[in-house]
């Protein structure tokens, strides 16, 4: 069983990259005009699709990397840089703007039937950052117990995301524009620090192997 600090680090990394609180206003935007029951159906479907996607990369991430001839340390560096870029976007509020554009495109194209899959599940919940984090963390959670622990963490993060969707109206009203801005920036700083740690660990492993 992985140590508690590793479990906590994995939980924080995934929770910050998914960013449930930041998705609340976007969920309201793409489900505009729906009643509570319809919104709940969309939330359930989006959460399940996102969970399945992240589980796939968490379980088969190392296999995919091996098939492509990519070492885990190299992916740690690349994934860490990607997470740092996402943290940069969060700190300077660029990520929210990009997600809003994705949400607006989905409303005009697919309306109610497919918005659970796109853009809610992919790329808003299971985006590049969350997928990269899942693959990175899979290397640190080896063995059946480690994989089971990572699966539980993913389920917990998606469950929190689903709960945020269900309570989206209240959360959005409680935080307000200022609250969302402050929370997003704080999470961005935290993610930046975690990203630097990923790059540092990957670089050390690469130098040791070379």
Image (cartoon, rainbow, N blue to C red):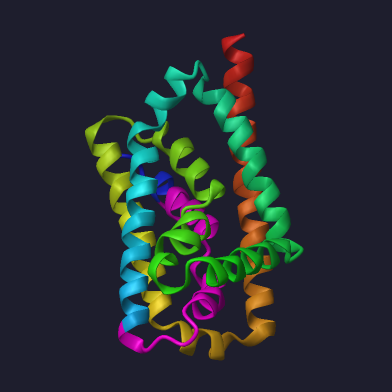
Residue at image position (29%, 38%) is 147
Query: Magenta region: which residues?
Result: 8-37
Foreground pick, 64 / 71:
64
Up/down of 41 relative to 73, above or below = below
**Residue 86 shown left or right of residue 69 in the figure:** right
175 in magenta: no
Q: Main secondary structure of the magenta part?
A: helix
**Residue 97 shown left or right of residue 69 in the figure:** right
Task: Specify the farthest residue to the front.
Answer: 109
Foreground pick, 152 / 205:
152
Up/down of 80 relative to 5, above or below = above
Q: Position of residue 126 (x, y in %)?
A: 46, 53
Task: Specify the farthest residue to the right.
Answer: 92
**Residue 51 shown left or right of residue 89 in the figure:** left
Up/down of 4 relative to 63, above or below = below
Locate the C terminus and report the quarter of the image it occupies.
top right
Foreground pick, 24 / 5:
24
Q: Position of residue 165 (x, y in %)?
A: 42, 76
Locate the N terminus and report the quarter of the image it occupies.
top left
């Amino acid at each position: 069983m992985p140590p508690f600090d590793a479990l906590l680090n994995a939980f924080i990394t995934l929770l910050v990259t998914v960013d449930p609180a930041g998705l609340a206003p976007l969920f309201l935007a793409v489900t505009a005009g729906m009643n509570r029951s319809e919104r709940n159906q969309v939330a359930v479907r989006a959460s399940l699709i996102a969970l399945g996607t992240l589980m796939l990369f968490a379980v088969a991430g190392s296999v995919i990397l091996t098939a492509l001839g990519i070492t885990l340390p190299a992916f740690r560096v690349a994934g860490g840089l990607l997470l740092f870029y996402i943290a940069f976007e969060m700190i300077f509020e660029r990520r929210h703007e990009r997600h809003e554009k994705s949400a607006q495109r989905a409303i005009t194209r697919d309306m109610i039937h497919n918005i659970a899959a796109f853009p809610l599940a992919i790329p808003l919940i299971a985006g590049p950052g969350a997928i990269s984090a899942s693959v990175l963390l899979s290397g640190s959670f080896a063995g059946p117990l480690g994989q089971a622990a990572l699966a539980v963490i993913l389920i917990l993060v998606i469950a929190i995301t689903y709960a945020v969707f269900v309570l989206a109206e209240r959360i959005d009203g409680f935080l307000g524009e200022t609250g969302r801005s402050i929370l997003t920036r704080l999470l961005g700083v935290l993610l930046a620090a975690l990203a630097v740690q990923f790059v540092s660990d990957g670089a050390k492993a690469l130098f040791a192997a070379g």
